[in-house]
C-alpha cells in the first residue's frame, strides 16, 4: 500500500531534550516536506526537500533541522525543543514538486513541557 | 510565493451545493491551483487541481475565471461527511513552487 508513515504518532517530552520524528514514504517520491499545524495559524511549512541531499527552508524553519540521506526518509530533528514547538506535525511527499499532489502522513502530536 | 485568501468558515445544509471561493491576486502565469481537504486529526488530502476554465472529478468541480485571480471549489450535494477544512494553494506544476502556503483554509460545517 502506497503510504507516508510517521513515528512516533504521539510524543511528550521536556524542554531541551533532543528528539527526532521519522518520516518514510514507499512511493519513490522525490519531494518531501514537513508542516506544523497550530490552532488559528493553519498549516505552515517547516522544511522541504527536492531530492536526496537537497533541502530548503519553508516558512517556519527556526528550531528545526532535517536531513535527506535516502530518498524514502526525511526525518525532522528538534535539537533543543521548546514549549512553542508543541504542535501537530505532518510529513508529506509528492512525485516531483510541492505543487504535485502531496500525500500526507497521519501526523505526530508533540507536546514539549 | 503566491498567497491565497479564503473565507474562514462556511455552514451548509445537507444536500446543498457548496461553493468555496479562493482569492489569489498575485498568481503567476505558470501557477496551478490546487485544493485539499482535511478532516480533524488527519493529514490533508488532495481533491482537485486546475489551470483554467473548469475541471471536474468524482468529488468536486473547480471553476477558474479567465483572469485566474480567483477560483471556486464546488461540492455538489454535500453530506455530513464533507465537514472538513478546505485549503486552496497556488504554485507551479512540475517545477518550482516548492515552498507552499496552505494558510488557515475554510472550515465547512454541514448541518443535518
Image: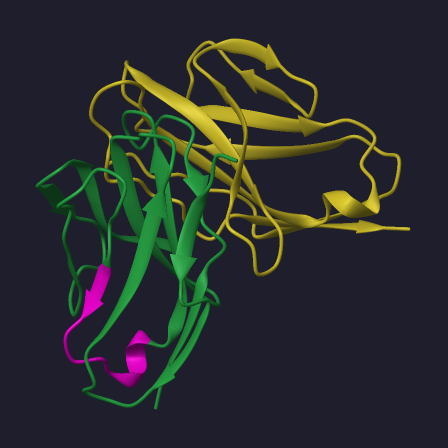
Chain colours: A green, B yellow
Identify the residue at horizontal 22%, vertical 20% (top origin): B95
Residue B84, horizontal then vertical, whole percent: 65, 49
Image position of A99 with respect to A72: above or below: above
Q: In the drawing, does residue A5 fall left or right of residue A55? A: right
Image position of A95 with respect to A91: above or below: above
Q: In the drawing, does residue A66 fall left or right of residue A41? A: left
Residue A28, horizontal then vertical, whole percent: 31, 30
Answer whether residue A81 is magenta in the image: yes
Residue B97, horizontal then vertical, whole percent: 24, 30
Identify the residue at horizontal 61%, vertical 28% (top origin): B73
Magenta highlight range = A76-85
Identify the residue at horizontal 51%, vertical 14% (top origin): B65
Image position of A97 with respect to A8: above or below: above
The quarter of the displayed image where residue B90 is located: top left
Identify the residue at horizontal 30%, vertical 52% (top origin): A34
The quarter of the displayed image where residue A84 is located: bottom left
Image position of B98 with respect to B27: above or below: below
Q: Quadrant of the N terminus of chain B?
A: top left
Amino acid at each position: 500500500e502506497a503510504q507516508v508513515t510517521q513515528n512516533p504518532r504521539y510524543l511528550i517530552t521536556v524542554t531541551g531534550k533532543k528528539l527526532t520524528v521519522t518520516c518514510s514514504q514507499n512511493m519513490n517520491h522525490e519531494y518531501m516536506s514537513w508542516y506544523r499545524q497550530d490552532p488559528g495559524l493553519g498549516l505552515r511549512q517547516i522544511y522541504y526537500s527536492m531530492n536526496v541531499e537537497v533541502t530548503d527552508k519553508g516558512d517556519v524553519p527556526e528550531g528545526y533541522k532535517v536531513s535527506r540521506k535516502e530518498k524514502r526518509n526525511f526525518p525532522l530533528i528538534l535539537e533543543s525543543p521548546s514549549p512553542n514547538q508543541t504542535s501537530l506535525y505532518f510529513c508529506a511527499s509528492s512525485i516531483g514538486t510541492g505543487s504535485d499532489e502531496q500525500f500526507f502522513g497521519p501526523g505526530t502530536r508533540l507536546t514539549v513541557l | 510565493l503566491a498567497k491565497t485568501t479564503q473565507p474562514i468558515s462556511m455552514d451548509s445544509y445537507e444536500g446543498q451545493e457548496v461553493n468555496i471561493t479562493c482569492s489569489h491576486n498575485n498568481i503567476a502565469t505558470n501557477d496551478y491551483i490546487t485544493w485539499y481537504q482535511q478532516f480533524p486529526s488527519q493529514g490533508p488530502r488532495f481533491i482537485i487541481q486546475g489551470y483554467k476554465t473548469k475541471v471536474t472529478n468524482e468529488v468536486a468541480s473547480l471553476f477558474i475565471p479567465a483572469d485566474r485571480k480567483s477560483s471556486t471549489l464546488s461540492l455538489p450535494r454535500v453530506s455530513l461527511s464533507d465537514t472538513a477544512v478546505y485549503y486552496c494553494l497556488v504554485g507551479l506544476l512540475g517545477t518550482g513552487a516548492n515552498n507552499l502556503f496552505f494558510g488557515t483554509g475554510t472550515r465547512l460545517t454541514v448541518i443535518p
